[in-house]
Amino acid sequence: MEASFPSIQSFFSREVLSNSQNNNDESSIIRKPGDGFTDSEVNAALNPLSCEWKPQRAYERCDISFLETGPHNYEISGRVVNFRIDVQGHHLFIVSDGTGVIAVKVYYLSVSDYQEVLLGQRVTIWTTFISNATNLQYRSIPFCMSVTTILPGRNVSTHIIFHNDSPGSDAYRILRCPLDCDLENYDYLPGLMTLKAFLSTGHDMTGSKILVCVRSVGQRRTIHSKKNQKSLNMVEVGVFDDTATCTLKLWEDKIASAKTWAPSQTMLLISKPTCRAGQMPVHLGIAHNSIIDVDPEFPEVDWLRSKLKNITKRQSICLPFPTETWNIDLAIHGPGRTLFTIAEIEEQVRFPDTAVNFTGKLHVMIVEMKIMELWYKNNTCCVECCGIPLYSNKPVATCKNCGSHRDLSLNPRIIGSLIDESGTVAASKLVWHDDAWTQLFFGGTEKGPQFEDGSEANLIEQSWEDLTALDRISLKDIEDSMLYSHVTLTFGLHVFMAK
């Protein structure tokens, strides 16, 4: 007796279209034309990267330094430390997990399958074959001993996923240990030097590394390359450490990474950066064999971050008033209203016995005013945005880098210096409250300043922002009246013992 085998039609459910005019008539049922595949199956075949990838075999999780050449099913996790887009028909990603580096060649089916990649982004790779990095372009990359090829969408056994981790999550903090760094027995990071040493002579050394902090992120610019005879996009990123300041140039697809970096916060460990020595100003660059670790984790990062925090405060053009630290009403009307001199405050700062937080009064004379000087320079108000100073004669301005509207503060350099019988202090480094500015300029006048139309300002609802609405003559009168005047300031000071 012959065995009966099921037909192929029995494995698929019939898709029918009911006739809206007569739903009860079986003869009105019309078959939907097609080849038997559902819409989800067709979409999975035409656009495989849009579907969730589910591995069909077992993969072994392995550190990059322990990868063996040949056919192996490996699951590799790391972070992108460099990349080049569309290199001889493929995209090249350099991935590091802190133990080693692997070069990943990714062949996409179409250009639309490629997604934007950022430096420092976490990736997961599933591969079935590891090759030796015998090519010279791979062997020049530090610690790069392996190469693998990924064909997402065409080979069901290889795949790559670029993760978008939320800041502060556990996945965001992992895999940030730099190469050649043993945190358990840490002494120093080989090849690490200061930015000043690298710019002077360190760029001639092999294996040089610099640890810098992002200072500012410039605007996207289009540069015409005479060498390649085409236009290229470029962004200049200001970087610095405790010894020097420099500019890092990013080109084309690496520009997107700079937009995610926070000024005065993001740290970069750059191995083998390029440097155009002998040209001023000196610029840093990223070559094909450079390694860029974004926000790495090792002891020097914490030390430099703390060091730069104090440097940034000293160099900042306008510090916000610490409203959460000081109780203004208690400082003005409370019991601690002792009159200090500048010399007594300096003694407390230079030779503190214990950590102390105190307020008091200070009677000084203004010996330098720069209202008109800053007004002519359009620098009456200021703020920092994207790590770049933003100046204007109005209390509101637009950042040219990110396009956001920012509320500005009065430039503290309007007052040059203050003195008393014991010493002097640069008023540009004082942090002023908005009410203090208002009382300084308008609270002591018997008659309100006049606007251009001849009307007087209402001192009851006066604020320092009204200073920006005055004309040149009115500003000059205020400057002359404030010069060599005596004022009493209520101040707060925080002194701490360094460990």
Image (cartoon, rainbow, N blue to C red):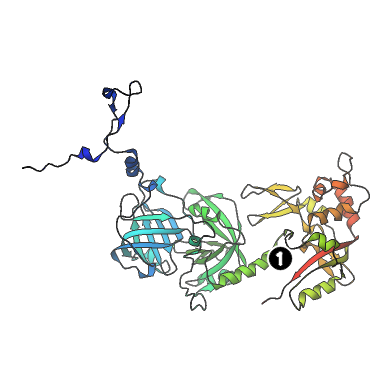
The image quadrant of residue 415 is bottom right
Q: Which residue of the protein is positioned furthest toward the front in this rendering?
A: 24
**Residue at the location (43% across, 58% down)?**
123
| Of residues 89 and 332, the one drawn nearer to the viewer in this rendering | 332
Q: Amino acid at mark 1?
A: Arg
Image location of residue 159, percent across then percent down: 35, 55
Image location of residue 358, percent across then percent down: 79, 69
Q: Is residue 32 above or below residue 160?
A: above
Quarter of the image where the C terminus is located: bottom right
Image location of residue 222, percent across then percent down: 54, 48
Q: Which residue of the protein is positioned furthest toward the right in this rendering?
A: 446
**Residue at the location (29% across, 58% down)?**
57
**Residue at the location (48% across, 48% down)?**
230
Q: Is residue 416 visible?
A: no
The image quadrant of residue 440 is bottom right
| Of residues 415 and 185, the one drawn nearer to the viewer in this rendering | 185
Image location of residue 127, percent across then percent down: 33, 59
Residue annotated with mark 1:
314
Q: Is residue 448 visible?
A: yes
Q: Is residue 391 left or right of residue 295?
A: right
Secondary structure under the numbered disc 1 in the rendered image: helix
Q: Is residue 141 left or right of residue 199?
A: left
Q: Is residue 180 above or below residue 127?
A: below
Mark 1 closeness class: few <14, some 14–19, many ≥20 residues within 10 Å: few
**Residue at the location (42% across, 61% down)?**
94
Q: Which residue of the protein is positioned furthest toward the top in this rendering?
A: 21
Quarter of the image where the N terminus is located: top left
| Of residues 238 and 101, the one drawn nearer to the viewer in this rendering | 101
Q: How many discs appear?
A: 1
